[in-house]
Amino acid sequence: METKIILCDLDGTLLRSDKTISDRSVAVLAECRRRGILIGFSTSRGRANIIPYEAQVKPDILICNGGASLVYAGKLIHTSTFSLEETHRILEASYAVCGLDAEITLDTLDSFFWNRRQDKSTDYDWDANYDDFLNFSTPAMKVCVQTQDREKALRIAQAVPGCDMLPFSDIPWYKFSSSAATKENAISFLCSHIGVTSAQIVAFGDDHNDIGMLRMCGTGVAMGNAIPEVKETAAAVTGTNDDDGVADFLQKHVL
């Protein structure tokens, strides 16, 4: 079936290990767009954390915060967030379960917050807004907590009905979001909005929260560096993120 949309996860997929996009990948995606294919990011990152990549690739579609927000043609067309009360419950549970020194990040629609001023545990975003989350005033799209302990993560998730949790494979953190905030739900909304089917989408991913997306799209492609569960789900496996795996697959099978 003719490809109408290409969706790329960012970290571990379109981004190389140094968090850059290769010139080759940018050029291949631009050629796909020239041929009438819509280009999209589908990422756990918030909008504030993808601005440099938007400038490079100029995507038509932005699925951010793991599906909590969907932007098409520059317009926000769908969101799924915690309420302010639910946000407070998640934050309170995070401190109660993991201690007052727990490291937490939080995404709203437009901003990214971190409860550490310095010595952050990763280089994810050194320019994050600081907040101690003791009296946060905006509903969260997602909350991330530094822990590898699944039992602790379960206790945090139980603070809010309908809260999903997922680990990251490359960092010792868990992500907490509304059960409605998934990449596949955002894709379903997008397909209805613009009149395409999921069978007309080629999607690329590498981590836990890409599995549903790869299953539902017509061609789900796992990166060579993907976790085993993603490779088992995918219709195909391409090269690694550091070897232009996305560009390789698109040149061979789409262009």
Image: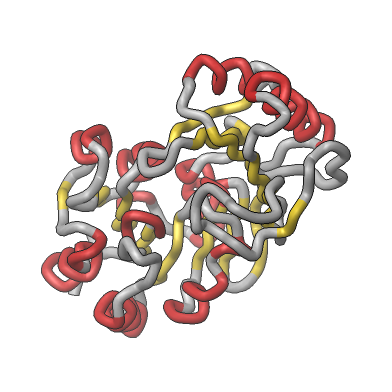
* Residue 1 in the image: above or below residue 165: below
Residue 181 pos. (x, y %): 58, 40
75 versus 106 height, above or below: below
**As drawn, which residue projects farthest toward the left?**
252
> Residue 4 placed where, x, y %?
35, 65
Please tell me which residue is depicted at 28% across the width and 49% down the height of the picture: 218
Which residue shows up at 56% across the image and 57% down it?
193
Q: Which of the 4 image quadrants contains residue 8?
A: bottom left
Q: Is residue 126 visible?
A: yes
Q: Residue at x 73, y 58 (%)?
A: 129
Quadrant assignment for the N terminus = bottom left
Q: Position of residue 13 (x, y in %)?
A: 32, 57
Instruction: Work out whether residue 75 or residue 102 is closer to the camera in this orientation and state it.
Output: 102
Q: Camera-side residue: 96 or 155?
A: 96
Looking at the picture, tell me which residue is in the foreground, 15 or 147. 147
- Across the whole image, how many numbered discs are drawn on residues? 0
Residue found 31% across the figure and 65% down from its top = 16
Residue 1 shown left or right of residue 16 in the figure: left
* Left or right side of 92 for 166: left
Q: Quarter-wise, where is residue 42 in the image?
A: bottom left
**Residue 192 in sight from this viewpoint:** no
Residue 17 in the image: state x and y as whole percent.
32, 61
Locate the C terminus by quadrant.
bottom left
